[in-house]
Image (cartoon, helix red, strand yellow):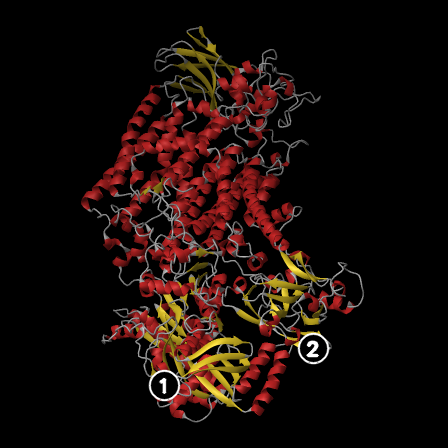
């Protein structure tokens, strides 16, 4: 049985497992699915037995297409987009005789768009394929005939026994059997999975510890019964059946694909889930891709265009039905067998219907087919080139640049009105420092927190903020009080409490020590910085935690028995009741060497207070006061408590605990319940206070943002006092503001709480919240109507919020909070954060942005219009869920006021311009229709029409979408009020669109009638006349020139690229028409033959070319002049104020990240470099859902996040991939292919450019 | 893609002591493109610019307008509408019937020259309400057939005038050729024939490339219902200039086409006798027919539109320039006055 024989499908036995497995085949990707019934049985080390179950192989394919499916599937994807489908329909109509244009007119633009999209798809898929190949072919050692044999990953099968070496990646989900470390422990890094860089411990079952060498392991025969593949990363339940003995399995024994092995020579494991059934592959989330509000409005605009198109066609169709008459005998409208139905005067209705289709085809350019592609291309370059590369948003200390993970939402950044911010790690640095503590009713720690200083400044009181000597300070420990240091605590009134306090700090945690076992050199791997700060504090107090084994914690205690005595004590850890956000506490049951059983618990004050033993009310009261005092200073508090256990009691409980731990279903819940049984009757020791300093520049940033008309809400889990003080410190709330506080911490409520009647409490709370809300709302209205109109602020806590979010009160809450310029919600759960966000998003229909750094912010980030993650700090979950990732809160200024605003301006311009140019072009056609007996005769040549959008007017609008700047970055930040234009959506209102529509109508009238009216007489001194095609070529030339000049008129800045693109487009037209009409082509082109030469031989051509664009743009120019003169936009005034200034934005830019760092910064930087905090963020902009949806978001297409993102992240080594450049290159290549002949003329334009007054030399 | 001067400093990121820990710096490289600092000029449409632009336009446009108006005024044009007059009085109730009858359709018209007309004088016919730009009409031709004798059967687009009932291809096929104009004019002054030169009335490019030298009319107008002119089957299409002119379809339903040119001067007061054959039937659809004698200027025929348009635009610009100037002088808006900023105008608002 040992090893494999390579045969699949042979053998017998295990038929039952086949049936069971089949139930999992319908698993969909997405949220956590209900677990499939049944479980899978894996026979370790027995390929034959497993073969029957037909488990999937380990080869992973993340490609969307293969060679054969590419075209059909790819095209199908493309045609799910409404615009493409519309043009496909038009193309089909244009192949019928109804069409006035040759199919080329519509097929060409469509195929260009499709080509661009398909090339991109193919290229991306190819890249994925190569990645897959590399991953599938990487080798791993598999047990085969008592030897380790190198095998590629893809050959791996369920049940195989494999060996993974240090720093190696796990090729599949493995059951951890043995490790070279003592105690069957190994350390893994899950950075690829969840971004957390602290090492995690996994521990094998004792029974399998010694299966380390191949001789031994080949004897191993186990049967694993476990759950079906599912996507929950943190759960795993199953049993290992060895020697008729069933051993419970937990996530602790599971090594997930995508993680890597650290600090362990090698491990041996059995493959449980393979390939697409691994947790990480199953876990690829389906996050709905966000679409920007502007884009949604754009859809409406397109819809409006459709209705315009429809009315135009109906009008024309009716006209044609009336026009058709046999009296025009030369048109031969007659009812003979050979006449097409469209020209049969006997049935006018049919004529009208058919003409309707004719006209739809003719007017199809009114829908700008290249709009979506262009906008996406612009946004893509904006996000990858501008946002990702902005040096102003590069945080040198953490070496983190900004990263746009989606390119869908750039312009949304320019319209944000509400910001929902997390506090910890977002407004603050998330560098936790042990600052104060209260032990047995005595406060220790003399420091003055930043917040206290700010509060003092506010109230005007003087605070001696002399800096403490930094001697005793290390990272995470900013405590200074001689009474506790160097064993001095022995002389304090309550040394026993102190001892318990320190032991609790040293024992009750899940921190891993790393490195040398000396206080100076040791490094702690902690899940959160709070934890490591507490352990460091214990170390500084003389309780040095230096070693951990799965069952023991070793603490080097000083001064315990007598001063100066150091002894190593091993505490046996019996149970760890882990922290989670519902429990809000963490407990450890340990046994002292002398047999004493203690439960140490630390957690949030509310949770601990609920579970305290009766008695000692004084201590409780004093401690509560201290807690409030700490909270008011903006400190984070934790309560510590312990409980002595009797062996009997413990044994009883432990039985239940083991039972719960080995249960297959609802294990988490059962564990929580069991924990409740023992976490009671606690004895309070004291509490800790940890300072989390404000991030650099936060107050200024908030001030700037609020000047920009953005309202900032802080949603935090902290206590109300802490939250209010933080809000003061970061200038969110000021004394001049009128504050409304709705709190559940009133005596009334406490009283009812103590009675313990939940129903009554709920009823009372609801009533209270309702009344409070109403009262506040009325007051707010009064303030708003009053003379002074003070700014308002609302503070509400989580419990009240729960009731306020009730549907009946929601409206009142919304009204009240919308009137407030600052809102602080404290003690809110992640879910409430999301609820508040969507309340404003949906209820008020305002654009919201959520910013946060931790896992608890994920829901809020996903709920908001724009989600921003703080990168480079805690974990990566927030960043993974976000649309933009920045390193510091203060970079929001840059992101919103500069990038967002520009992006909004640019996209608005691009969209309105597209709208205008296509409407104008189509309207000229429309006017012509009236003169052709509504026959649908085209005015322009097929090729002119098809190239109008894709060549003659394509590039300049992209240039404006990339380079236009109303005011430069410095001014954007100096005048944050400019941002309000975006909030008001000043540039894409229906009024703006209507203005453009007016211009389009006016210009089309001028263009058409001027050209036509001036061309109906002899055109040169030889008396010759023009025909239709001469006139239309003239008109088309005027259109191209007019449209391109109009673009220049709307530019705020003109770079050389504007000149090149505008000049190039016009030149491209002339070049094209010179070539096109210069030769007789085999078919369909004689109309145009020589037309341009004939035209250009007349004065008429030049006179018209001067007259028509000027006359057409005349009104636009008046509008622009008058608008600027009499109704200037704010940005225009700012432009004028600074019109003589040379931009100095660049000064200092080169130094960012390069200059000498101040000692304080150096310290911060060094902290960042610690492994616990070091970010391995590689900038997944290209793996992001946004990137996948590049080109894809046309009209309501839903783009799920792709499985391969997570999978690839998880499966790839951190190889330095060369990402961005390639993508950019391909788009530029496409651009250049599209505009290939433009290049020839660039040189010419450049020379022209030098003739143009030396405008380019002012650096802007 | 970057501007010409990337001037990147990122070549040596970690210069000083920070070099060691920052080996894998993710610091974005500096380039003017990515930092969005391309050199640019920032035109501001200040009142001065507005006024000068209007002035500039008026300065350029008014002279052009004057010049082209003068050019247009120099042209002498005589128009004679004849479609009703050329029907005998008794047939005017049934014009179509008259046209279909075999009656003599000769018609004499007298034109008085009002002004001296320098040669060459161009003779045009003008049709009204004639949709040469109708979709069915425009496409009803075969350029292949017209160009190349080998493509005689290339008639797929010509329906219903593609073949004779016997199935022989018609050259030139299609509705355009079929409905060719066939009124003829002969002019005389003082009983002396005025020669009408019909050579060189079409664009040369049409003659050279679009109508083949080896293509001769065939089976043309042989059907029961001839639509218009017949063609001499011994003359190649490239020399049938009337056809070539006709086949360059007009843009609008009212159009003129060149008939020929008179190469002598006409004096003011000259009386010209026109003998015309009123063959072409426009009576079905109430189409007007006009005979036009016109000289040309360097700009072309008589068309005031261009001159008026130039003058209007130029004049409007001038008025606007004056108007703006007045506003500018009376109530100037100070450039860059911060009090115009919206948040300064209504403090505390919004």
Residue under label 1, please give it. A489
In the displayed structure image, the side of residue A1204 where residue A790 appears, left or right: left
Position of residue A642 relative to residue A978, above or below, is below
Subunit under mark 1 = A
Residue under label 2, please give it. A246
Residue B145 can be seen, yes or no: yes
Q: Provide the secondary structure element on which disc 2 rests.
A: strand
Cα gap from disc 1 to disc 2, whole angstroms: 50 Å
What percent of the width, then of the height, locates residue B129? 50, 28
Task: Estimate how packed mark 2 is, as few (under 14), some (14 to 19) or many (20 or more) residues with alpha carbons within 10 Å.
Answer: some
Q: Nearer the viewer, mark 1 or mark 2?
A: 1
Q: Which of A103 and A529 lies nearest the eye of the viewer?
A: A529
The residue lying furthest to the top in this view is B192
In the displayed structure image, the side of residue A1208 where residue A1159 appears, left or right: left
Q: Which of A536 and B115 lies nearest the eye of the viewer?
A: A536
Quarter holding the N terminus of chain A?
bottom right
Q: Earlier in the sequence, mark 1 or mark 2?
A: 2
Position of residue A113 relative to residue A1, above or below, is above
What percent of the width, then of the height, locates residue B336? 24, 49
In the displayed structure image, the side of residue A672 where residue A741 appears, left or right: left
Residue A1042 can be seen, yes or no: no
In the displayed structure image, the side of residue A581 where residue A815 appears, left or right: left
Quarter holding the C terminus of chain A?
top left
Position of residue A683 relative to residue B277, above or below, is below
Q: Which of A271 and A878 lies nearest the eye of the viewer?
A: A271
Residue drawn 38% across and 43% down?
Answer: B6
Q: Which of A245 and A1119 lies nearest the eye of the viewer?
A: A245
């Amino acid at each position: 049985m040992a090893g494999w024989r390579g045969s699949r499908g042979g053998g017998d036995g295990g038929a039952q497992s086949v049936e069971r497995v089949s139930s999992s085949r319908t698993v969909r990707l997405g949220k956590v699915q209900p677990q499939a019934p049944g479980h899978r049985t894996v026979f370790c080390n027995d390929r034959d037995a497993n073969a029957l179950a037909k488990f999937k192989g380990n080869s992973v394919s993340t490609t969307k297409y293969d060679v054969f499916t590419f075209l059909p599937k790819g095209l199908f994807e493309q045609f799910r987009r409404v615009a493409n489908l519309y043009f496909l329909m038009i193309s089909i109509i244009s192949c019928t005789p109804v069409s006035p244009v040759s199919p080329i007119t519509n097929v060409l633009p469509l195929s260009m768009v499709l080509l661009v999209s398909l090339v991109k798809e193919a290229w991306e898929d190819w890249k994925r394929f190569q990645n897959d190949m590399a991953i599938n072919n990487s080798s791993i050692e598999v047990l085969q005939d008592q030897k380790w044999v190198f095998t590629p990953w893809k050959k791996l099968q369920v049940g195989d026994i494999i060996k993974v070496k240090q720093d190696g990646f796990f090729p599949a989900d493995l059951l951890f059997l043995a490790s070279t470390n003592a105690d069957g422990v190994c350390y893994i890094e899950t950075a690829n999975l969840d971004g957390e860089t602290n090492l995690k411990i996994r521990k094998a079952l004792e029974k399998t510890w010694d299966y380390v060498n191949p001789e031994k392991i080949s004897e191993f025969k186990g049967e694993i019964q476990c759950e079906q593949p599912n996507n929950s990363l943190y759960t795993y339940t199953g049993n290992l059946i060895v020697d008729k003995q069933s051993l419970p399995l937990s996530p602790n024994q599971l090594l997930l694909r995508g993680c890597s092995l650290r600090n362990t020579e090698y491990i041996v494991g059995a493959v449980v889930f393979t390939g697409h059934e691994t947790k990480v592959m199953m876990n690829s989330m389906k996050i709905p891709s966000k679409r920007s509000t502007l884009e949604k409005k754009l859809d409406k605009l397109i819809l409006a265009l459709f209705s315009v198109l429809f009315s135009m066609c109906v009008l024309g169709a009716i006209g044609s039905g009336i026009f058709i008459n046999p009296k025009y005998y030369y048109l031969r409208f007659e009812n003979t067998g050979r006449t097409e139905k469209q020209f049969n005067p006997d049935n006018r209705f049919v004529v009208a219907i058919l003409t309707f289709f004719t006209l739809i085809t003719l007017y199809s350019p009114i829908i700008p087919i290249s709009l979506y592609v262009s906008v996406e291309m612009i946004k893509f370059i904006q996000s990858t080139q501008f946002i990702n590369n902005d040096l102003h948003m590069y945080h040198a200390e953490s070496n983190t640049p900004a990263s746009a993970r989606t390119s869908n939402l750039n312009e949304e950044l320019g319209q944000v009105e509400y910001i929902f911010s997390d506090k910890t790690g977002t407004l603050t640095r998330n560098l936790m420092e042990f600052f104060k503590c209260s032990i047995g009713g005595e406060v220790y720690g003399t420091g003055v927190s930043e917040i206290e200083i700010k509060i003092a400044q506010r109230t005007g009181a003087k605070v001696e903020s002399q800096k403490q000597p930094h001697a005793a300070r290390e990272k995470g420990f900013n405590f200074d009080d001689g009474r506790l240091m160097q064993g001095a605590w022995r002389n304090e009134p309550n040394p026993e409490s102190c001892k318990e306090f320190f032991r609790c700090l040293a024992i009750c945690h899940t921190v891993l020590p790393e490195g040398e076992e000396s206080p100076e050199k040791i490094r702690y791997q902690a899940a959160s910085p709070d934890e490591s700060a507490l352990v460091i504090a214990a170390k500084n107090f003389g309780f040095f935690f230096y070693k951990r084994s799965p069952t023991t914690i070793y603490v080097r205690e000083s001064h315990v028995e007598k001063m100066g005595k150091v002894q190593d004590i091993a505490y046996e850890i019996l149970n760890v009741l882990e922290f989670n956000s519902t429990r809000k506490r963490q407990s450890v049951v340990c046994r002292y060497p002398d047999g004493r059983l203690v439960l140490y618990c630390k957690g949030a004050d509310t949770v601990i207070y609920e579970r305290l033993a009766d008695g000692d009310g004084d201590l409780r009261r004093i401690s509560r006061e201290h807690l409030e005092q700490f909270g008011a200073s903006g400190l984070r508090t934790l309560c510590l408590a312990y409980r002595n256990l009797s062996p009997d009691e413990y044994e009883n409980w432990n039985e239940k605990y083991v039972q719960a731990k080995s249960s297959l279903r609802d294990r988490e819940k059962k564990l929580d319940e069991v924990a409740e049984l023992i976490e009671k009757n606690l004895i309070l020791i004291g509490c800790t206070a940890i300072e989390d300093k404000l991030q650099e520049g936060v107050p200024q940033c908030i001030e700037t943002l609020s000047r920009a008309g953005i309202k900032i809400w802080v949603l935090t889990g902290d206590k109300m006092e802490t939250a209010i003080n933080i809000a003061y410190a970061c200038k969110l709330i000021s004394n001049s503001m009128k504050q409304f506080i709705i709190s559940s911490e009133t005596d009334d409520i406490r009283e009812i709480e103590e009675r313990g009647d939940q129903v009554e409490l709920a009823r009372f709370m609801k009533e209270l919240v309702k009344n409070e809300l109403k009262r506040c709302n009325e007051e707010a209205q009064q303030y708003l109507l009053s003379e002074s109109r003070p700014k308002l602020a609302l503070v509400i806590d989580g419990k009240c919020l729960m009731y306020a979010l009730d549907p009946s009160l929601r409206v009142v809450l919304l009204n009240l909070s919308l009137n407030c310029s600052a809102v602080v919600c404290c003690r809110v759960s992640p879910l409430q954060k999301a609820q508040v966000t969507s309340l404003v998003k949906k209820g008020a229909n305002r654009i919201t942005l959520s910013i946060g750094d931790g896992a608890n912010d994920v829901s809020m980030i996903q709920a908001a219009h724009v989600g921003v993650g703080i990168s480079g700090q805690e974990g990566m979950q927030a960043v993974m869920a976000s649309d933009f990732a920045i390193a510091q809160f203060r970079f929001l200024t840059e992101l919103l006021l500069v990038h967002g605003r520009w992006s909004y301006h640019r996209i608005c311009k691009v969209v309105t311009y597209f709208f205008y140019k296509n409407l104008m072009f189509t309207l000229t056609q429309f006017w012509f229709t009236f003169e052709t007996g509504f026959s649908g005769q085209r005015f322009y040549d097929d090729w002119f029409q098809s190239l109008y959008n894709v060549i003659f007017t394509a590039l300049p609008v992209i240039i404006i979408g990339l380079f236009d700047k109303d005011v430069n970055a410095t001014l954007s930040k100096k005048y944050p009020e400019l941002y309000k234009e975006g909030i008001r959506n000043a540039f894409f209102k229906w009024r703006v669109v209507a203005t453009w529509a007016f211009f389009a109508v006016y210009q089309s009238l001028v263009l058409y009638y001027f050209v036509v009216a001036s061309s109906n007489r002899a055109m040169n001194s030889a008396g010759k006349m023009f025909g239709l095609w001469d006139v239309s070529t003239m008109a088309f030339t005027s259109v191209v020139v007019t449209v391109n000049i109009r673009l220049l008129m709307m530019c705020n800045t003109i770079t050389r690229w504007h000149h090149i693109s505008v000049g190039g487009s016009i030149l491209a037209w002339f070049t094209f028409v010179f070539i096109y009409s210069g030769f007789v082509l085999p078919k369909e082109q004689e109309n145009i033959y020589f037309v341009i030469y004939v035209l250009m031989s007349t004065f008429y051509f030049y006179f018209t070319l001067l007259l028509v664009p000027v006359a057409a743009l005349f009104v636009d120019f008046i509008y622009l002049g008058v608008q600027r003169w009499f109704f200037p936009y704010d940005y225009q005034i700012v432009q004028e104020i600074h019109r003589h200034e040379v931009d100095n934005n660049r000064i200092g830019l080169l130094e960012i990240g390069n200059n000498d760092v101040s000692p304080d910064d150096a310290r911060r930087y060094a902290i960042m470099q610690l492994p616990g905090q070091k970010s391995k963020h590689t900038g997944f902009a290209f793996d992001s859902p946004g990137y996948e949806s590049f080109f894809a978001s046309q009209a309501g297409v839903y783009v799920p996040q792709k499985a391969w993102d997570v999978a690839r992240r998880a499966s790839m080594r951190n190889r330095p991939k060369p990402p961005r450049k390639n993508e950019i290159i391909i788009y530029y290549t496409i651009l250049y292919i599209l505009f290939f002949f433009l290049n020839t003329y660039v040189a010419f334009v450049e020379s022209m450019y030098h003739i143009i007054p030396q405008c380019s030399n002012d650096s802007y | 893609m970057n501007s010409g001067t990337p001037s990147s400093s990122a070549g040596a990121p970690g210069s000083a002591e920070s070099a060691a820990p920052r080996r894998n710096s993710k610091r974005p490289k500096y380039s003017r493109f990515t930092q969005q600092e391309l050199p640019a000029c920032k035109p501001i449409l200040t009142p001065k610019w507005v006024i000068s632009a209007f002035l500039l336009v008026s300065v350029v446009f008014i002279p052009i307008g004057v010049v082209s108006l003068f050019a247009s005024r120099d042209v002498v044009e005589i128009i004679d509408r004849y479609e009703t007059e050329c029907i005998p009085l008794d047939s005017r109730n049934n014009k179509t019937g008259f046209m279909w009858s075999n009656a003599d359709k000769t018609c004499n018209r007298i034109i008085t020259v009002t002004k001296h007309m320098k040669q060459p004088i161009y003779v045009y016919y003008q049709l009204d309400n004639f949709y040469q730009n109708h979709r069915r009409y425009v496409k009803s031709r075969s350029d292949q057939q017209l160009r190349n004798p080998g493509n005689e059967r290339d008639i797929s687009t010509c329906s219903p005038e593609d073949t004779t009932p016997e199935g022989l291809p018609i050259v030139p096929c299609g509705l355009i050729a079929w409905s060719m104009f066939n009124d003829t004019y002969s002019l005389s002054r003082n009983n002396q024939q005025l020669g009408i030169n019909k050579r060189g009335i079409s664009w040369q490019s049409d003659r050279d490339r679009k109508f083949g030298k080896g293509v001769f009319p065939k089976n043309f107008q042989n059907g029961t219902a001839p639509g218009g002119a017949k063609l001499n089957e011994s003359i190649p299409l490239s020399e049938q200039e009337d056809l070539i002119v006709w086949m360059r379809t007009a843009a609008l339903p009212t159009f003129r086409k060149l008939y020929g040119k008179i190469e002598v001067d006409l004096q003011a007061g000259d009386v010209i006798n026109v003998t015309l054959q009123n063959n072409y039937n426009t009576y079905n659809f109430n189409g007007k027919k006009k005979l036009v004698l016109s000289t040309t200027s360097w700009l072309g025929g008589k068309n005031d539109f261009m001159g008026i348009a130039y003058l209007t635009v130029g004049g409007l610009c001038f008025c606007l320039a004056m108007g703006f100037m007045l506003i500018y002088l009376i109530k100037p808006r100070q450039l860059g006055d911060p009090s115009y900023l919206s948040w300064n105008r209504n403090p505390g608002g919004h």
